[in-house]
Amino acid sequence: MRRTERHRTERFDTRGGPPGSRRQQRQRRRVRGALVAATVSLGLLLTACGGGVGEDSNDGGSGKARQDNGFPAPAPAQPTGPPDMDGGTGQGDQGGQGDERKGELRETAPPADYLSTFALDVDTASYGYARRTLREGRRPDPSTVRPEEFVNSFRQNYERPDGNGFTVTMDGARTAAADTPSREEDYSGSSDSFGQENRDWRFLRVGLATRGAEDSGERPPAALTFVIDVSGSMAEPGRLDLAKESLDVMTDRLRDDDAVALVAFSDEARTVLPMTRLGDHRGRVHEAIDTLEPTDSTNLGAGVATGYRTAVDGLREGATNRVVLLSDALANTGETDADAILDRIADARRAHGITLFGVGVGSDYGDALMERLADKGDGHTTYVSSAEEARKVFCDELPRNIDLTARDAKAQVAFDPATVDQFRLIGYDNRQVADEDFRDDRVDGGETGPGHTVTALYAVRVKPGARGHVATATVRWLDPSTRVPHEETGRVEADSLDGPLWGPTTARSGLQVTAVAAYFADALRAGDGRWSALPGALPLPELARHAKALASTTESPAIQQLSSTITQASTLNT
């Protein structure tokens, strides 16, 4: 089912490119371009004559390289020089996919692309905010539903590495039984156009895991700058009061050698507490937290800029330096664009590697702004709506996962045209990276810490009777201290995807939880023309029953909560 291989990174010359003169490189590119054009033309001619792509096909007319075993190779190596963040974001339209291609099922027959490349993402805010809105009797706006954040809200039992970096696990299953058609008539809220072809569709899961979270006594010390929104909107119960209570509890749980700074912002921003080593000064931190009161409007840009300035002023060598932004992200004063806000503090991010952790609160929540800030700020987001959730984030997850195990992590999945007709990455719409930028370490990826798992789920249509390799997944990351690049690879074959989705094996592996979360997000996005329905989709009541059965089997409160949330959604009018 799974095989991993560790790869050493290629060495490049000092000009930041492959060995050889620039003139030679240009000549090679021109020759390759001519060969690709000729190959594509020949492929189209053969197709017009009734020919197909057989096992003896060299590269399927795509001009891409293949490995010795006939399997498509990952993207060619690119310069690995030190990342400067000006080399591209690797997100959104930088990924070369374009908004018009979101959710498309892309054919991998020549000359279409058979590579899928994205930056890793451990955000969970979208799922938390959806649960909040459904509890209040309304469906979330489809634009706030990000399937990868639903999927990654549930930790998986993937094998973990001993040190920094990742393991790669690949598995999957049929989205419907081999002898049954699609359940189009059962799926309310969307149309299922897969019909009898549904039997050829599979879910392919790519699971990445970091090492387990170590005891808090073994991690590096932390230097945390909390940037707290104290605007008028934060007066709503469950916002600033929740933040203050959680910060008080967290202050008592952090270690003596940790340090905390506090910045508050409304229409202006101010440093309430400079970087203060806890030790015997916890009382001083509690007093600063007590002074926070809601007032005026939301100048989020000023808050972030002041927060980073305070973090730089209190920078601690050998510590994990991080800005933690807590806000409803309803910016209405000053700079309100995420890119412009982060441009103002770009030097602090580049020179000092200070990451941003966004914590969203409130029934009205600026989801898009907070997500963009975290993506561009080399961090991640979560959302809290109760005291229990806030304590978990601030008192358990944040102290335990302060350390980083990987920077600028990206994944690339290469599908085999000999076995795959079509594929679709479910979610990660804002995290796509151009295929050729996979090994360009100047292009931003995602940051992960100990105890994290990252799951990417694909809908894959295999060719009837296909056997052999289906896909190779490679994850690339930089060591958080040395910035040395590393890679890990896994492969999967067709017979590993032949089992039924709703069988006992997939229940034990966690694949069913992944599928339920993805189907749930897909249902909440139904009606938005940017995304098509997933194969094998189930009506919400049946999806809730699957979640309830999983909760009973696993005794997992998180999966029980998922079942209840899906049931709530099924009772609302679409």
Image (cartoon, rainbow, N blue to C red):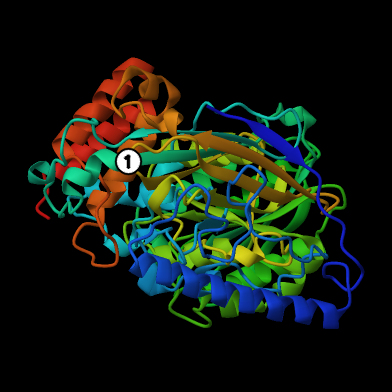
Q: Secondary structure at mark 1?
A: loop
Q: Amino acid at mark 1?
A: Pro
Pick the residue in front: 359 or 67. 67
Q: How many marks?
A: 1
Locate the C terminus and report the quarter of the image it occupies. Answer: bottom left
Q: Label 1: few (<14), some or many (≥20) within 10 Å?
A: few
Residue 275 in the image: above or below residue 127: below
Residue 503 x %, y %: 30, 21
Residue 145 x %, y %: 34, 56
| Outermost residue toward the front in this view | 49
Asked whether, in this view, residue 460 is left or right of residue 569, the answer is right
Pick the residue in front: 206 or 237. 206
Q: Residue 313's quadrant in the figure? A: bottom right
Q: Residue 510's quadrant in the figure? A: top left
Q: Give me the residue at 44% from left, 55% from top.
A: 53
Mark 1 highlights which residue? 464
